[in-house]
Image: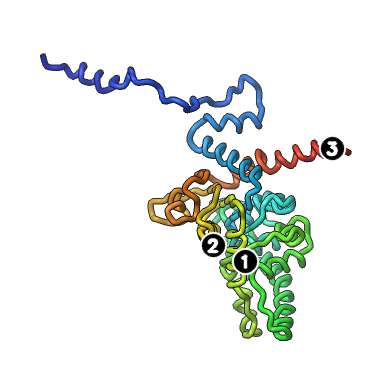
Amino acid sequence: MSKTPNTIGKENVLRDKDNPDPKGLPTVQGYDFNQGVDYDQIIESYATTGFQATHLHRAIEMIKTMRKEKCTIFLGYTSNLVSSGLRDVFRYLVEHKFVDVVVTTAGGIEEDIIKCIKPFFIGEFTAAGKELREKGINRAGNIFIPNSRYCAFEDFFIPILKRLAEEQKKTNNIISPSQLIHMLGKAINNKTSIYYWAYKNNIPVFCPALTDGSMGDMLYFFSYEHPEFKLDEIQDIRKLHDITITAKKTGLIILGGGVVKHHILNSNMMRNGADYAVYINTSQEYDGSDTGARPDEAVSWGKILPGAQAVKVFGDATILFPLIVAKTFAQESKRNSRTQSLYI
């Protein structure tokens, strides 16, 4: 007897009805607002919410483990995140020595210094570029940066370069970009600055793309007056690799992509791979870019260990990273403060 379409349909749809449920996996469960509003528990509920919420929770747990295992923690972020309010989150982490190495791009250096002098503003993504240009305002997303800010940075930066050029003439000592950043942090002497605290806490800041920004423009003009002036990038790559190779364990927190992401991962290839890695960005891997690549691609290069804990969270770091810091570094700091108060 031939089967009817109805019978065939039922067999196909219900074919696995007697198979056992997967073992050892948590069930999907969201937050119950009937229990009130508890922000800490809302984030905890992400573990079983699914999608990127669950990846966010995994990132939080991995960073907690990095701290427990005393990993050398590399923090990488792109310059646009310093344009945003995340700059204050990065400053907090460096101020309290929660990270050991920082890698960023030129804008990630100069815009921190500029904000010590004058603020940026919240505008609109839809603001017309032609009108902003006429008003002398640069737009980074919905953040407005008046061009006068870079003039103020030039007034700060050029005298430092002149002093360095004079010293270089006398001593033939060529400094590295990380040493220059160290000097900028000392010179700005402002507690709102990431690099002030990097200077105070002796945390190295590497900028492999130092000329890709306002600093590069100023170095270009400066080179015509001081053609003999040089910076030594080789010192920095040696310093970075030495830190990476000699670390007992490494943990990576990389926000965004490009040169920042690759520079940290490439250094960890020198030790046959990082032990932990957390990526946060919005890029996809279809075009073969390193920015969009998931952690498993880095395993193939020896940049992350095959047995490492690693996760990529797809999303906007300005939303996600404050939540991560709240549940990891800041929570740990609050717990330590309570413990210390018991002995006062």
Residue flagged by tag 3: what amino acid is it? Answer: Ser
Residue flagged by tag 1: what amino acid is it? Answer: Lys
**In the drawing, does residue 334 fall left or right of residue 317?**
right
* Quadrant (top left/top right/bottom left/bottom right) for the C terminus: top right
Please tell me which residue is depicted at 69% across the width and 49% down the height of the picture. 98
Question: Does the CB distance between marks 2 and 3 fall below 8 Å?
Answer: no
Which of the 4 image quadrants contains residue 230?
bottom right
* SS label for mark 3: helix
Please tell me which residue is depicted at 23% across the width and 20% down the height of the picture. 9
Tell me the distance, in whole angstroms, between the alpha carbons under discs 1 and 2.
44 Å
Which of the 4 image quadrants contains residue 107?
bottom right
**Label located before the other in sequence (2 or 3):** 2
- Which residue is tagged 3? 341
* SS label for mark 2: helix
Confirm whether residue 157 shows in the render. Answer: yes
- Which residue is tagged 2? 130
- Which residue is tagged 1? 239
